[in-house]
Image (spheres, helix red, strand yellow):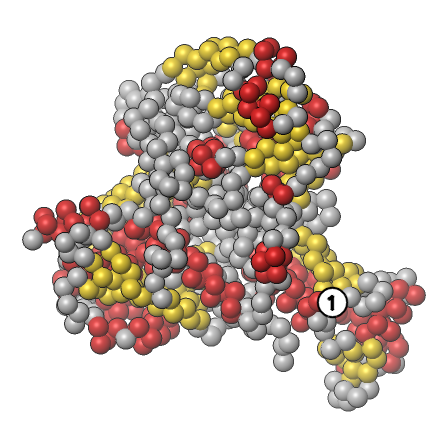
């Protein structure tokens, strides 16, 4: 019986965060440290004619000024052939806020003053600020190397969708538009860099140190062994800190130039304007069903606004289609995603990237159910995927308890007593969702881990895993302690340090539990076997006859015959074989042709090693006189396999619900006609607070995944909260939502138009 696996154990990082001793990057202060500031473009699109930094360099206290001429003029991008973003603009600027020059000075005030002395001459160019307009013939070109501003396309198809739609008994055609939103992490962005003895150390709030190190090596020109990216506490990520940003490159170059540590801290405005946004999008959806409610055909065309650079848009373009194909089975399915360049802040992956599309598919199912006289629950049960099913792209879904999640959600929410029986303005709705654990990262998709023992029989886990706040570190403590028969306080963790730790994808697309957790478990099991082998020699029995628990190795048939773990560890050291476990886990190949297919935007092959599923029921109260929506209650049931720490999983389910609620009802990143950001702070960009959150009942299904550690998968944003809220609004008002966010003004207008 497990001591720690499957138990709700308080997180190890709770105390330092509560006491304020947790060190975020901005808490760092190194000896002789300088402070950096960045000069940013005031234009959405302009040619750089000249830059004069002479006056800034003469200002007392300024130690260095850099422009693109001080760089290798290399560009960033996740895929080698698609790299398009300079870390300091060297020919044109393509969005308001783009980095043009940077200063390192003795104080922040001096650095700010120096920026005002840098003279940049621009030639302003026409800008394009809408993804649909960007595709039109004659629109301004953001980049010369592409036609009609198309930055990336992704597609997957099974069957003849157009022919199937013609044969369907019922066909619906819906469009959903969603505006840009910001990841809006509470911690502003920045970095600390220190170049000493030919080696660059970097601290920044990032999701993936190893991919960050690779990018820095490409951009700065140092080999990997001369760059060290280190762990620090992170104040939120949500997918928006997976890329490499100019902050690390600028701090690194300035440190190399001055031979002193350099710190750059973004303001809230800079964080919103010059890191990453979520993609605005327009999805055009055609769905066809038979009269028995079975889904026959689904055709989706998506146009995504990517901003000025590609960023992680390769994955973001394909993710919405993959989310739908793994949720509902349609023998005829086609998804075409087109990502467009515009003169705005670059967009990247977002934890709830797929919300608008999945939400609209959920709404269309409810509309069909009403027309056919079928309960929405039954409509879903007739069309959901199941265990061992195969998606349109060829991914095998190894484990799936979505049917059981739906049934449990119905029971817990009291659906049968409420659906169709609520007064006007009151509504109840259902939604389903799923997420894949991981997407292509090349050789950095697998994870390795080490477990070493100290002579006092305590252990240290060495893993590249990153914790953005999900509790990933806690899982590694629980796994190692349980496998090694130790208490949690007898396990130490060294993580997210590219110098000390083996390869790991980091906190990238829900890989922590499934990929990194498997690697740590294998490493711990390897160390455990080494201990049992040493103990077998000491006890003159076979290693197979022994077990390890509670700091002792004992005979399985006679637990009273035992040796203290300390004695075994000391013997191993004396024999010159100190216990050092090693584990590596690499998921199945994600595409039959590997990177060739992925770079071409072909969504075929095993897209994710496993999938998590969930169902949600939302109850809302719509003020019919104002259009204001209040979510009264959320009931969530998720299939996450076997939860290693149920409390942590439920906490993630509730936090994801907050993300989705904000995305559906509140959040809106706005720009004026010149490409200047209007929502430049938390006063104008409206995040949900505790006052907006309803009571949440979060529940887990008992299940397991055949490949997951102990049967675990990952939490994932799988509750279907967006579909539940939209369908509850539809149930309360009869209004079909076609745009996000659902503001009171737009909803009231739709209510009045309907009546």
Residue 46 location, quadrant: top left
* Nearest the eye: 383 or 99: 99
Q: Position of residue 121 (x, y in %)?
A: 46, 11
Which residue shows up at 20% across the image and 46% down it? 745
Name the residue beneath numbered marker 1. 490
Task: Examine the rendered structure and indicate whether residue 139 appears above or below residue 622.
Answer: above
Q: Which of the 4 image quadrants contains residue 278? A: top left
Residue drawn at the location 66% of the way across and 26% of the way down = 106
Regarding residue 343, the answer to whether it shows in the image is: yes
- Measured as percent of width and height from the top left, residue 561 is found at 82, 86
Instruction: Give the farthest residue toward the right.
Output: 574
- Left or right, 141 with reference to 502: left
> Residue 698 in the image: x percent, y percent?
41, 68
> What residue is drawn where x is 33% and y is 75%?
412
Residue 559 pos. (x, y %): 76, 87
Of residues 96 and 82, which is closer to you in this image?
Answer: 96
Q: How many marks?
A: 1
Q: Is residue 573 left or right of residue 672?
A: right
- Residue in front for this viewpoint, 100 or 505: 100
Say if residue 158 shows up in the picture.
no
The kind of secondary structure element at disc 1 is: helix
**Residue plotted at (51% across, 23% down):** 39
Q: Is residue 729 above or below residue 739?
A: below
User: In this picture, is 119 found above or below 524?
Assistant: above
Q: Is 64 situated above or below 307?
A: above
Where the N terminus falls, by quadrant? bottom right
């Amino acid at each position: 019986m497990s001591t720690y696996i499957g138990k709700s154990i308080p997180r190890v990082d709770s105390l330092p965060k509560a006491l304020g001793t947790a060190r975020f990057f901005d808490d760092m202060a190194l000896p002789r440290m300088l402070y950096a500031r960045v000069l940013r473009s005031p234009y959405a699109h302009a040619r750089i004619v000249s830059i004069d930094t002479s006056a800034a360099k003469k200002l007392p206290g300024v130690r260095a000024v850099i422009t693109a001429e001080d760089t290798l003029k290399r560009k960033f991008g996740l895929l080698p052939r698609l790299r398009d973003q300079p870390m300091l603009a060297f020919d044109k600027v393509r969005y308001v806020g783009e980095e043009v020059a940077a200063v390192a000075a003795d104080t922040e005030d001096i650095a700010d003053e120096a920026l005002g002395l840098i003279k940049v001459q621009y030639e302003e160019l026409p800008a394009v600020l809408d993804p649909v307009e960007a595709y039109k013939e004659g629109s301004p070109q953001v980049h010369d190397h592409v036609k009609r501003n198309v930055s990336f396309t992704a597609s997957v198809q099974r069957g003849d969708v157009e022919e199937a739609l013609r044969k369907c008994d019922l066909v619906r055609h819906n469009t959903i538009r969603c505006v840009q939103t910001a990841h809006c992490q509470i911690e502003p962005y920045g970095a600390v860099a220190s170049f000493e003895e030919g080696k660059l150390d970097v601290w920044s709030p990032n999701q993936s140190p190893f991919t960050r190190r690779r990018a820095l090596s490409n951009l700065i020109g140092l080999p990997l062994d001369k760059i060290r990216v280190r762990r620090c506490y992170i104040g939120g990520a949500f997918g928006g800190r997976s890329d490499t940003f100019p902050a690390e490159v600028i701090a690194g170059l300035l440190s190399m130039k001055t031979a002193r540590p350099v710190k750059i801290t973004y303001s809230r405005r800079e964080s919103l304007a010059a890191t990453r946004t979520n993609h605005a999008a327009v999805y055009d959806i055609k769905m066809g069903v038979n009269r028995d409610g079975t889904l026959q055909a689904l055709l989706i065309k998506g146009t995504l606004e990517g901003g000025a650079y590609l960023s992680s848009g390769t994955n973001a373009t394909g993710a919405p289609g993959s989310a739908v194909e793994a949720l509902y089975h349609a023998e005829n399915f086609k998804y075409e995603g087109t990502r467009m360049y515009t003169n705005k802040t670059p967009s990247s992956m977002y934890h709830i990237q797929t919300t608008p599309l999945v939400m609209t598919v959920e709404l269309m199912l409810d509309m069909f159910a009403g027309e056919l006289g079928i309960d929405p629950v039954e409509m879903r049960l007739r069309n959901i995927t199941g265990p061992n099913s195969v998606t349109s792209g060829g991914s095998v879904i190894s484990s799936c308890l979505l049917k059981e999640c739906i049934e449990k959600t119905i029971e817990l929410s009291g659906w049968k007593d409420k659906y169709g029986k609520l007064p006007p303005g009151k509504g109840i709705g259902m939604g389903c969702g799923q997420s894949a654990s991981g997407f292509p990262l090349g050789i950095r998709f697998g994870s390795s881990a080490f477990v070493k023992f100290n002579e006092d029989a305590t252990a240290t886990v060495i893993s590249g895993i990153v914790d953005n706040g999900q509790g990933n570190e806690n899982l590694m403590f629980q796994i190692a302690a349980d496998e090694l028969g130790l208490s949690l306080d007898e396990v130490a963790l060294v993580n997210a340090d590219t110098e000390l730790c083996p390869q790991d994808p980091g906190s990238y697309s829900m890989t922590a539990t499934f990929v990194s957790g498997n690697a740590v478990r294998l490493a711990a099991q390897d160390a455990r076997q080494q201990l049992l082998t040493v103990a077998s020699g000491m006890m003159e029995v076979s290693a197979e006859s022994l077990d390890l628990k509670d700091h002792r190795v004992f005979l399985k048939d006679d637990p009273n015959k035992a040796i203290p773990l300390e004695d075994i560890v000391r013997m191993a050291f004396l024999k010159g074989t100190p216990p050092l476990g090693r584990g590596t886990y690499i998921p199945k190949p994600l595409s039959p042709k590997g990177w060739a297919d992925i770079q071409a935007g072909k969504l075929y092959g095993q897209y994710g090693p496993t999938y998590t599923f969930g169902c949600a029921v939302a109850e809302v109260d719509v003020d019919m006189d104002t259009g204001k929506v209040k979510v009264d209650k959320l009931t969530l049931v998720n299939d996450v396999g076997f939860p290693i720490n149920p409390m942590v999983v439920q906490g993630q389910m509730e936090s994801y619900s907050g993300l989705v609620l904000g995305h559906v009802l509140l959040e809106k990143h706005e720009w004026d006609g010149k490409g200047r950001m209007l929502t430049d702070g938390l006063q104008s960009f409206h995040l949900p607070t505790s006052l907006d959150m309803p009571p949440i009942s979060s529940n887990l299904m008992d299940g397991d995944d055949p490949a997951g550690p102990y049967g675990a998968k990952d939490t994932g944003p799988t509750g279907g909260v967006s579909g539940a809220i939209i369908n509850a609004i539809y149930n309360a008002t009869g209004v079909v939502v076609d745009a996000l966010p659902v503001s009171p003004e737009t909803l009231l207008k739709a209510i009045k138009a309907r009546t």
